[in-house]
Image: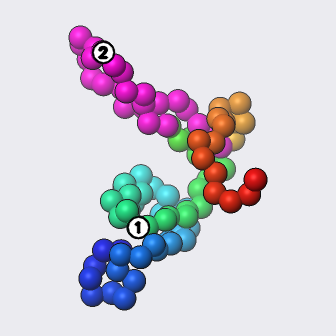
């Protein structure tokens, strides 16, 4: 992605992967590449969590929140409106 020896260095790259590559450890590592779009299959019952909202005033005790709202692929009541969309109308 950013290796100067490859001809596509610095250009937008797309990686299509099977569900094995939808694990958090792999996704976090690939998120470091700003010019990479990763498309990976995932199980139909997988649960994701949004980033937690940033609080204006810090809490007095305890760790900061790690997870935001729950997003379950199998439960349409947890789906939210998209923030942005590519293409279409």
Residue 34, located in which quarter of the rendered image? Answer: bottom left
Q: Mark 1 points at which residue?
A: 35
| The stretch drawn in magenta includes residue 66 | yes
x and y percentages locating residue 32 in the rendered image = 33, 59
Residue at (33% x, 87% y) in the render: 6
Do the residues bearing badges 2 and 1 touch, measured as CB atoms within 8 Å?
A: no
Q: How many angstroms separate mark 2 from mark 1 (CA)? A: 34 Å
Q: What number is the disc on residue 89?
A: none
In this picture, residue 26 sits left or right of residue 48: left
Mark 2 Cα within 10 Å, few/some/many (few <14, many 20+)?
A: few
Residue 62, located in which quarter of the rendered image? Answer: top left
For the question of whether residue 22 can be seen, the reply is yes
In this picture, residue 43 sits left or right of residue 34: right
x and y percentages locating residue 20 in the rendered image = 50, 63
Q: Which residue lies furthest to the left in this view?
A: 60
Residue at (45% x, 55% y) in the render: 23
The front one of 11 and 65 is: 11
Residue 42, located in which quarter of the rendered image? Answer: bottom right
x and y percentages locating residue 1 in the rendered image = 36, 74
Q: How has the structure been colored for display?
A: rainbow
Question: Which of marks 1 and 2 precedes in the sequence?
Answer: 1
Relative vertical location of residue 51 with respect to residue 5 in this rendering, above or below: above
Q: Mark 2 points at which residue?
A: 57
Q: Which region shows up in magenta?
A: 50-73
x and y percentages locating residue 74 in the rendered image = 69, 41
For the question of whether residue 29 can be seen, the reply is no
Q: Which residue lies furthest to the top in this view?
A: 60
Residue at (50% x, 72% y) in the render: 14
| The stretch drawn in magenta includes residue 9 | no
């Amino acid at each position: 992605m950013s290796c100067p020896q490859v001809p596509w260095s610095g250009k937008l790259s797309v990686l299509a992967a099977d569900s094995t590559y939808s694990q958090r450890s792999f996704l976090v590592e690939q998120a470091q590449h700003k010019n990479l779009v990763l498309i990976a299959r995932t199980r139909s019952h997988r649960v994701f969590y949004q980033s937690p909202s940033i609080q204006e005033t810090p809490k007095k005790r305890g760790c900061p929140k790690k997870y935001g709202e729950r997003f379950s692929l199998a439960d349409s009541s947890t789906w939210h409106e998209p923030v942005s969309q590519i293409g279409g109308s």
